[in-house]
Amino acid sequence: MLGRSGVEVEAVSSAGLPIVRFSRWCRRVHPAPAPSVDPVSYLQRVDALMATGDFDALLPTHEQAWLFAAGRGLLPHAGVAVAAIDAFDQVQSKTAFAALLDRLGLPQPAWRLVESVEDLEAVGFPVWVKAAFSTAGRGVALAAGPEQARALWRRFTAADPAMPVMVQACAEGRYAQAQALFDHGRLLASAVSEQLATGAGGSAAARLSVDHPAAVQAIQTLGSHLGWHGGITLDYLHVDGRPSFIECNPRTIEPGNAAAAGVNLPALTIALTRGDDLPAVPLLTRAGVRTRSTMAIAFGAAEQRHTRRAILAGLTTSLRRRPPLQGSTEVLTPVLADPPSLIPFTVAVGTVLAKPAQVASLASGTIETYAVTPAAIQRVRNTR
């Protein structure tokens, strides 16, 4: 989104060969310690880069937003648009976010904090069991009955007995996301999209921009209440545009559909960070724009179906833009516009075609490079 706009982009990553390296729009990748393993050294590395004066803005592309908020004092040279850490504390945890929605009167499925085995049955079955902290859908699972719910509760708390766990009733409707960018509580822009294809961890591998005023109003209410600064995303299910919120990602995620539909969230974030002119009234995306990430579609098919036939069917639908992907544009690996992106696409798709079960290890390896844990945040807080 930025390279196409003429912005020079460099990246920081703990991965040896991150996907961003295979883009003509990325000028350089700077190595850094993994933020989950050594968060303080990661922040010091980032600040040292910003201290060179070579960069105008620092954009968190995943859970680094949480880390930057907690370690703001360790980034004295960085211009970065992130909310205060006390605002993150109210939405980063799934249990805290659910409690905040209740206080604000925003719609969500019935839920209960699990403090005893009896709480697992409080909202009925099937039920979603959710660890308070997780990423990429790895701490969320559906339980058909009491025995499965107990097993999930034990699994989520095994590594950390103090980890809060909640259960939440299933919501009806289609999966969608509302994204927004705020300037200290003032809404600058919003983008709403609906899932057209499923990626790994239940993510949206293809999207359709939609007009859901109730979702925009809800995210505006939330951002205003928190005095939010920077990007934030709400996941929800809807029936005829009426949302039932299920999760918060306190950052900007997957901005391709929003940009294709008229709102370039990364470019606006740079303007916010630099103190440039900002929209006087909120920018909204136009409805009806379809985008896809073909590699993510292949990963989703491998994870859900575990067969080469399913993967090939997903690839065929995407590459030939068959319904529901008719008229869609590629946003993750746009090979014609960005030829180097063919390399990760070929390697990743070839790997899951050779062995569909390999998608789990590929996804886990990717998550490890960007995941931030509560323990990492606490270490940063203790360092400040």
Image (cartoon, grey):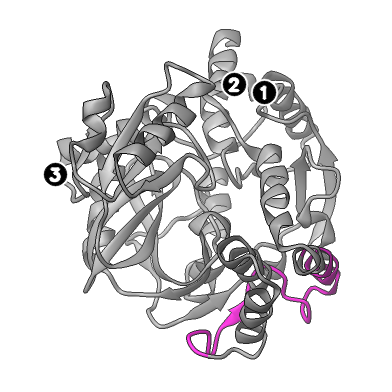
Callout 2 secondary element: helix
What residue is at 27 percent from the left and 54 percent from the top?
Answer: 170
Q: Which residue type does callout 1 highlight?
A: Pro
Disc 1 packing (10 Å; few <14; some 14–19; many ≥20): many
Quickly name the residue at label 2: 376
Find residue 337 and name its label.
Answer: none
Q: Is residue 325 magenta?
A: yes
Q: Position of residue 191 (x, y in %)?
A: 40, 64
Q: Which residue type does callout 3 highlight?
A: Gly
Q: Earlier in the sequence, mark 1 or mark 3?
A: 1
Find residue 39 and name its label.
Answer: 1
Location of residue 231 with respect to 49 vertically, above or below: below
Q: Is residue 91 visible?
A: no
Disc 2 packing (10 Å; few <14; some 14–19; many ≥20): some
Q: Is residue 50 left or right of residue 96?
A: right
- Name, please, the residue furthest toward the front: 147
Question: Which corner quadrant of the image does residue 344 belong to?
Answer: bottom right
- Residue at mark 1 to residue at mark 3: CA–CA distance: 36 Å
Location of residue 109 with respect to 189 vertically, above or below: above
Q: Position of residue 163 (x, y in %)?
A: 43, 22
Query: Magenta part of the protein: which range?
Result: 323-348
- Name, please, the residue furthest toward the left: 105
Q: Is residue 222 left or right of residue 384?
A: left
Query: CB of mark 1 within 8 Å of CB of mark 2?
Result: yes
Q: Nearer the viewer, residue 261 or 366?
A: 366
Question: Which corner quadrant of the image does residue 193 belong to?
Answer: bottom left
Q: Quadrant of the C terminus?
A: top right
Location of residue 350 with respect to 58 vertically, above or below: below
Quickly name the residue at label 3: 105
Q: Position of residue 159 (x, y in %)?
A: 54, 22
